[in-house]
Image (spheres, grey):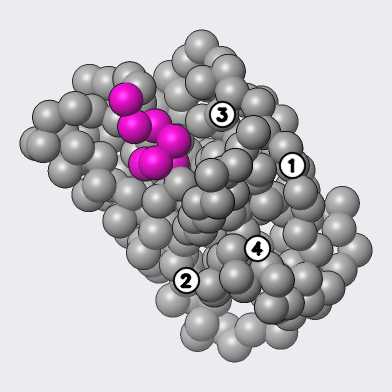
Amino acid sequence: MLTLYDYLPSQNCYKVRLLLNHLGQTAQIKLVSIFEGEGRTAAFCAISPTGTVPAIALDDGLTLAESNAILTFLAEGTAYLPATPQARAKVLQWLLFEAEIVQGGIATLRHWVQTGKDKARAPDLIAAKRDLSLKSLAILDAELGRNPFLGGTDYTVADMAVFAYVHLADEANLPLADYKNVTAWIARVQSQDGFLTTTYPYAIDPHSVGEL
């Protein structure tokens, strides 16, 4: 059975849970207390070299970290990862966009706001994260004005990856409702068969107010 190393408030972990739900695939969940230092142990770093979640382990001994790599691996041979090189490259384009731009902006800012860390950050750093977040929403709004899903007509792991943090952008005090194409896309994602509604706030972990 697949083992998922998980931290419930992480939307990177939610991405993997979302895909597994779409696939109807179960996993053994092992929770990792990242804010208590469990991610920095030698045992966990042997599974996830950077000490981050999510990570997976298979019965054959394979371990894999980084959420978007895990999505690509698990979606192989399914409708959620295109077969043609051109379409796969488009999915990869948006996975890279998510990893760099969305996580660098919306995801980080949301984490800071939801855990109170924004109070300890310099105003110019907060402003830079907000500017990057708004830039990413504008880019997505333009793309989703052209296509119903990221890069084309089909719902893929690219949409799952970007959705994870973008649909919670208002939790970063961002004006998500101003981006009508993005909000319409969020509704399309939420209407997909097997969509996973459950997410978890940082508030369930009293240690999340600390620094990693």
The label on residue 173 is none
Label 2 residue SS? helix
Q: Is residue 75 magenta?
A: yes
Of the two numbered discs 4 and 3 on the same chain, state the one appearing first in sequence: 3
Q: Badge 3 is on which residue?
A: 20
Of the two numbered discs 2 and 1 on the same chain, state the one appearing first in sequence: 1
Horizontal placement of 143 versus 180: left or right? left
Q: Nearer the viewer, mark 4 or mark 1?
A: 1
Label 1 residue SS? strand
**Residue 183, how many percent across, how many down?**
45, 31
**Residue 45, how many percent across, how many down?**
62, 72
Q: Badge 2 is on which residue?
A: 129
Label 4 residue SS? helix
Q: Badge 4 is on which residue?
A: 111
Q: Badge 1 is on which residue?
A: 29
> Mark 3 belongs to which amino acid?
Leu
